[in-house]
Amino acid sequence: MWVAVGELGTAWLRQGLWCLVSVFVVEIVRDTYHVASHVWPPLMRLHNWHHKAYRKDFTPVSVELYQAAQLYNDVPESLVMMAVMALVAVLTPLWGFWLGFLYGAGFLVAALLRSQGLLSGTDLTHEPGPLTTLPGLWLVNRTYHWRHHFDETTAYYAGYFTLSDKVMGTSLSLKGKTIAVTGASGTMGRVLIKRLAAQGAKPIALTSSAAVSIEGAVRIVPWRSGEERALKEILSRVNILVINHGVNVHGERTAAAIANSLEVNALSAWRLMEVFLETVDDRLGPATKELWINTSEAEVNPAFSPLYETSKRLLGDLITLRRQDSPCVIRKLVLGPFKSNLNPVGVMSADWVAGAIIALAKRDIRNIIVTINPLTYVVFPIKETAQALYFRLFSRGH
């Protein structure tokens, strides 16, 4: 008897797991339908009702247009979700997949009611008002979905789980974005600007080098460490700031070398970050602004340059602290040794590293690690998670 009870319990547990899988599968069906709605004309005609229904603050353009969008977009989408899950459930012996069918049915009922002016409060990703949170990392929220409507309609397709966008590389669109890059005349700055331009971005080169030509840059702006405040007007029109400048004094440890390393690698970057964060408005800023900061693999591994390590670790710690209440996404670029003017014996190609940075950013990876050292992929996430928790517990924001 106990054997039979145990087998029954195992069977129920197995079906329960398939129930959870069915929710994930039905969301993949929804995301696939959404992508198809942007490429297949018959579905595009229906989906366009959805995009016409909202103003930039997610208030409906009109009640009639909002209700029509529910009827012509959300209802067909729900029916497809139900049909696919019913087919899967019928063709397999896994009755747990019927939960996916019921999940889709819930969307159908809500869409029908909203099309009649009822239950509009259930449309959570389209609630009107300012965007008060950062874009969701694994789950879609209002800020994430706002980007699909008003940033780039050929990206940010996910409906609930962001995994499908991460796989497709559509979690972040660089098309049309104004992106300022410091250290633009250096090896990484140059290849990153070229790669960003190829993505349809409008790169601005921020450099201390005079009379320099940089391929892909739409504008070259001269600046030096200590002049961060003077860049505020330019940064107010920038979507993404990439803080990439740095100095490596190698084996030096003089007072001048210490001061220079701290100033260029840490303090200047910190001041520039704060100036940029002042430009993030409190209505749409979380969706329209980002910071990418090159802290280097030296955050957790030796670089055989003590002052480079010390200054980069200070910068990394300050960024982790600032992330606790940042008004926009801050990405760390944790890069291993690539061949450059600062590191002529680097192993990786700077162009390949730049391509990897962009590929990972488009998948909304917020700690972008590009290195040949496998330990970094283990050590850095542990360090970052533990330090972030420590900062959250023992410090207070504004």
Image (cartoon, rainbow, N blue to C red):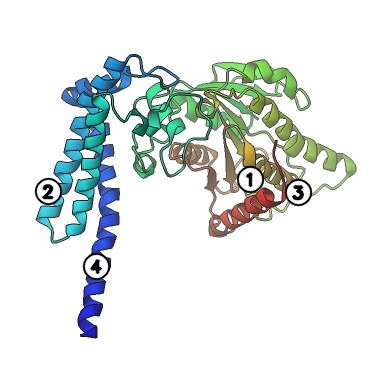
Q: Residue at 52%, 34% (x, y): give it.
A: 133
Which is nearer the N-term, disc 1 or disc 3?
Answer: 1
User: According to the image, label 3 marks what residue?
Assistant: 310
| C-alpha gap between disc 3 and disc 4 | 55 Å
Tell me the mark number nearer the camera, choosing from 3 and 2.
2
Which is nearer the N-term, disc 1 or disc 2?
Answer: 2
Which is nearer the N-term, disc 2 or disc 4?
Answer: 4
Q: Which label is found at residue 296?
A: 1
**As drawn, 159 above or below 65:** below
x, y percent for residue 216:
51, 21
| C-alpha gap between disc 1 and disc 3 | 11 Å
x, y percent for residue 117:
28, 23
Q: Quadrant of the N terminus?
A: bottom left
Identify which amino acid the numbered label 4 is placed on: Trp
| C-alpha gap between disc 2 and disc 4 | 21 Å
User: According to the image, label 4 marks what residue?
Assistant: 12
Q: Secondary structure at mark 3?
A: helix
Q: Residue at 25%, 73% (x, y): give it.
A: 9
Tag 3 and tag 2, C-beta contact below 8 Å: no
Identify which amino acid the numbered label 2 is placed on: Leu
Q: Secondary structure at mark 1?
A: loop
Tag 1 and tag 3, C-beta contact below 8 Å: no
Which is nearer the N-term, disc 3 or disc 4?
Answer: 4
Tag 4 and tag 1, C-beta contact below 8 Å: no
Q: Quadrant of the C terminus?
A: top right
Q: Residue at 36%, 41% (x, y): give it.
A: 160
Tag 2 and tag 4, C-beta contact below 8 Å: no
x, y percent for residue 314:
73, 45
